Amino acid sequence: MTTTDTTRAQSADETLVSRNPAAPDDVVATIRSATPDEVAGAAARARGAHRAWVGLGAAARAAALHGAAQRVEDAADDLAALVVREVGKPVAEARGEVARTVAILRYYAQQAFDPVGAVHEPAAGAGLLLTRRRPHGVAGLITPWNFPLAIPVWKAAPALAAGNAVLLKPSPDAAACALRLAALLDDVLPPGLFTVLPGGAATGSAVVEAADVVSFTGSTAIGTEVVRAATARGIPVQAEMGGHNAAIVLPDADPKATAAQLAAAAFGFAGQKCTATKRVIVVGDPAPLRDALVEATAALALGDPGDGATVVGPVIGERARDAVLAASASAVEAGGTLLAGGQEPSGTGWFVAPQLLEGVPEDHWLAREEVFGPIAVLFSVPDLDAAVALASSVRHGLVTSVHTRDLDAALEVVDRVDTGLVKVNAPSTGVDFHMPFGGEKESSRGPREQGKAALDFYSHDCTVSLLPSGWAR
Ligand code: NAD
């Protein structure tokens, strides 16, 4: 959404301007884009650094990643403040993101000691038959702005732990966070091993051209292009993309507790999470949940993201704000009702109050496509079959939550929905970094990321036959 948002960051691959979304006159960073030649030069240095890094051994790699975790932890307050300022994330969530970034680095630091293969008996004869996982070389990482530290690190840490070097192309809207991360890690990682290359589409394309493996997170439109380019080069690629996530609420769910979860999952951080709840599907009478959800939405604190009580800060740019308001207006015009949509704070920031709608036709684009902001639609359906069918009727398949006390119904949803994650009595948002993460359908391409799955992605098997010298078949 933001790649063409000229009010936010100029991504014409020359000068990037990253602004504070709560106060757009506050320029957070003005950064020159890395040119394709500079990307190629960084890739050549990274290739050399990767060979030296592998030669260091697991203990040194683990120590360096632990050192990186310590640097991030020591700078936690500054980093959280920068996240608030650059992307408008409410400070309580920003602190959580920094803590998660530290935990991810520590987790993958230890994974450097994981087994890298398996030993088998040869099918015939003497010796050993074994597999050994080897790094690809240079990992090209392309990241969005909404988790400006956690997403770069949940890609970079496993890539480094597996022995790769990293080229990171952050979002223009989060370039200052990425450059701060690189500065913090500068002397704990060997030179050339972790390079941040700020820029827009041209820099991103150059990274895809230069890397040996590519991991992308962002919109489905751009991710599809990146997958196509990497596949044409014959290199491994994964892409985590948009979501249009449903929460299925059964009649036995406690309306108040469920509404509190759903309001936070739909509108926290102004709905700018790939896992945000965008569709609430109520089975049976929608009235109790509707009333509770309107109340819970109204109770969310909207405003200055630097205030510890704020839950809903600004959206990333003017274009993003306009997209939310246009979607809401269009859905009302098509017959929908706006249940919640209060007053934005005054001032120049890019704020938009949470928009909760009902009665939106199922074929309206708001009901079918991700709008990356604080907007969600309430539907009611007669039974669980209809709920599962509606939840699965969109092209995305990232996460579904189901809210019920009925274990059989919950298990049925777990079995039937076509999403990569299913949450029972938990918000759609929130990811466990030690578990595989990814979606189905147009939410994802390629293998899962995070957890042990990431180490597999950033390495490949080599099968080795080890025979005694002089042995003849
Ligand atoms: P975006 O697709 O606009 O940009 C993502 C990255 O791609 C940026 O770094 C951008 O500069 C780069 N890019 C743009 N054009 C490129 C090209 N031609 N070649 C290579 N790189 C290019 O996404 P965004 O606005 O930064 O992020 C919001 C989107 O990200 C939403 O759709 C959201 O759902 C999704 N997202 C998904 C996940 C997930 O894990 N599934 C997580 C966070 C965000």
Image (tube, rainbow, N blue to C red):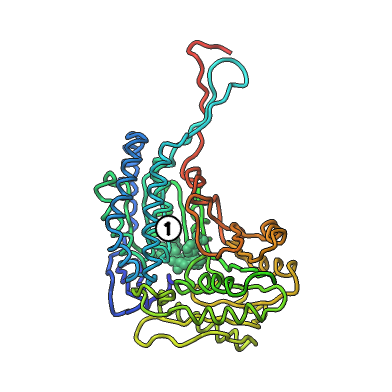
Which quadrant is the C terminus positioned in?
A: top right
In the image, 236 versus 330, the foreground residue is 330
- Residue 417 in which image quadrant: bottom right
**Residue 362 location in percent, x, y?**
67, 77
Q: Quadrant of residue 399?
A: bottom right
For label 1, the residue is 151
90 and 177: which is toward the camera: 90
Instruction: Give the image location of residue 171, x and y in percent.
Output: 39, 64
Q: Is residue 352 visible?
A: yes
Q: Which of the two residues, 451 or 257, is positioned nearer the viewer here? A: 257
Work out whether 229 lies above or below 268: above
Q: Is residue 269 left or right of residue 443?
A: left
Residue 201 in view of the camera: no
194 to the left or right of 453: left
Q: Helix or strand or loop: what does disc 1 sit on?
A: helix
Q: Residue at x 47, y 44 (%)?
A: 455
Asked whether 324 or 228 is in front, the reply is 324
The mark tally for this picture is 1
The answer to which quarter of the image holds residue 21 is bottom left
List x then y, in percent, for residue 79. Answer: 30, 62
The image position of residue 98, as x and y in percent, is 36, 59
Ligand 1 under 8 Å from disc 1 Cβ: yes
Judge the density around disc 1: few (<14), some (14-19), many (≥20) Cα neighbours within 10 Å.
many
436 vs 262: above or below: above
Task: Give, as a three-letter code, the residue at label 1.
Answer: Ile
